Amino acid sequence: MSKKLITILFTGLLVQANCSVEYPEKPDGSYESPNGAGVLEVTDGVKVLKLSGTNYEMGYAHGNLLAEEIVYFLEEFGFWFIKERNEDYEELVAAMSMVSWTEGYKQELEGMVAGIEDKLGSVEIKPPGSKKKNLDIYDLMVMNTGGDWACSSFSIWGDGTEDGGSMIARNLDYTVDPSDAFKLCQVIVSFDDGIHKRFAGVVWCGMVGAASTMNEDGVCMMTHDTNFYPTSDEEGIYPRGIVQRMVAENIGADNDPFDVEAMLDTTPVHTGNNYHVLFPAQGKGSDDAIAAVLEFDGDATRPDGRATLRSPSDNPNLPCDGNYDQRLEKTNCIICTNHYLERKTWIPEDGPNRYLHLKDSLVNMEGYMNLDMARNMADDVGHSGTSHTVIFEPDNMKLHIYLAEPDKGAFESRRLDYDFEDLF
């Protein structure tokens, strides 16, 4: 399979320039989609999109309520980055035939196209290096296969929190594009198809996959780009954001990280990922049942298959050399950045600096982890390309979200606090 499928879209390059096109801001208010399957609430510029119904109905509502923003994101971020990488857009579109969307997610994208067209009419776009054309499902597919994100996260529970419940904090660090479209087009979104588990999190306008999520059972999952092994599959590839959505929709409180590993082994991907997964601590019998990092790529020939489970009990035996000691004596926490520690044990040449900084903070912390401490740790390892910072408390079903503003890291913005049910 051509490497042009996913990796060329988003590779974590930090680029800044002057804005070219004005972002289509919506006035504060509540907007309902014509089919009744979605409500968009805008408060002080923050967008919360609540979706329910079939996949097609949710896609239609998403497309209709955020039509201008989806087109803006595609043209101002997606097309810009493809051009920066000097890639062939038509080859990307052709590669979509090798991607497995499952019928439901494909229907969601079909609904999104219909919603956009009902709102804006036929939308004419000009992909880089191609002729003008009307926007169609393949353009949205290309946009939805951009899953290579760079990030830092940690989770902690037990003696590390005041009530013993679990907490996860993460930065999503990424490219700063000329229009700041990647930051501007973030949306807090919830999904309820009436069949699977409801879930909510932060994505981008037009995305049907997931990036930072919590589901109705308090299962949290974060995605991080990493130093992966090449895929062993040539077709049936899943976008990594879709894999995370599948976990959010199907893994519940009765499951554990080992069940997530089993699911990942059945979902081929093109590029690699560290998935940081956290469960509510209440009722779990061991640290390893609460959290894990799934070191995941498409190489099914590895001894562990496509996914290698890194558990809290592995912390004391993690790789160490003369320069970088990644061992952590505590087992009531786990750290995830952008390199493997179990699936590959060699330490990257540039060093796991964010990992070690988070390790030092956890080792030296006094008292219990709280929101201010978690936010400050995110600040310490973030930068101006940090698009969002989230702190989730699954035992209490609370989500705390910071959305970046232009020229700022997300952790510099105001904190948005939600109970899970607020988002439905």
Image (cartoon, rainbow, N blue to C red):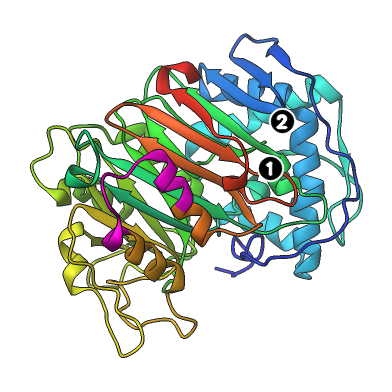
Whether 317 is drawn above or below 92: the answer is below
Whether 378 is drawn above or below 417: the answer is below
- Residue assigned mark 2: 113
| Front in this rendered view, residue 110 or 290 | 290
- Across and down, in percent, residue 364 comes to 29, 61
Task: Determine if the magenta segment contains residue 373.
Answer: yes
Mark 2: few/some/many CA within 10 Å (<14, 14-19, 20+): many
Q: If the image is split into quadrants, where does the N terminus sit?
A: bottom right
Say which amino acid is labelled 2.
Answer: Val
**Residue found 39% across the figure and 28% down from its top:** 398
Identify the element where label 1 is drawn.
helix
Whether 334 is drawn above or below 357: the answer is above
Marks 2,1: beta carbons within 8 A? yes
- Identify the residue at the far bottom of this view: 322
Q: CA distance from mark 2 to mark 1?
A: 8 Å
Say which amino acid is labelled 1.
Answer: Leu
Is residue 138 at least partly visible in the picture? Answer: no
Region rendered in magenta: 362-376
- Residue assigned mark 1: 140
Is residue 11 at least partly visible in the picture? Answer: yes
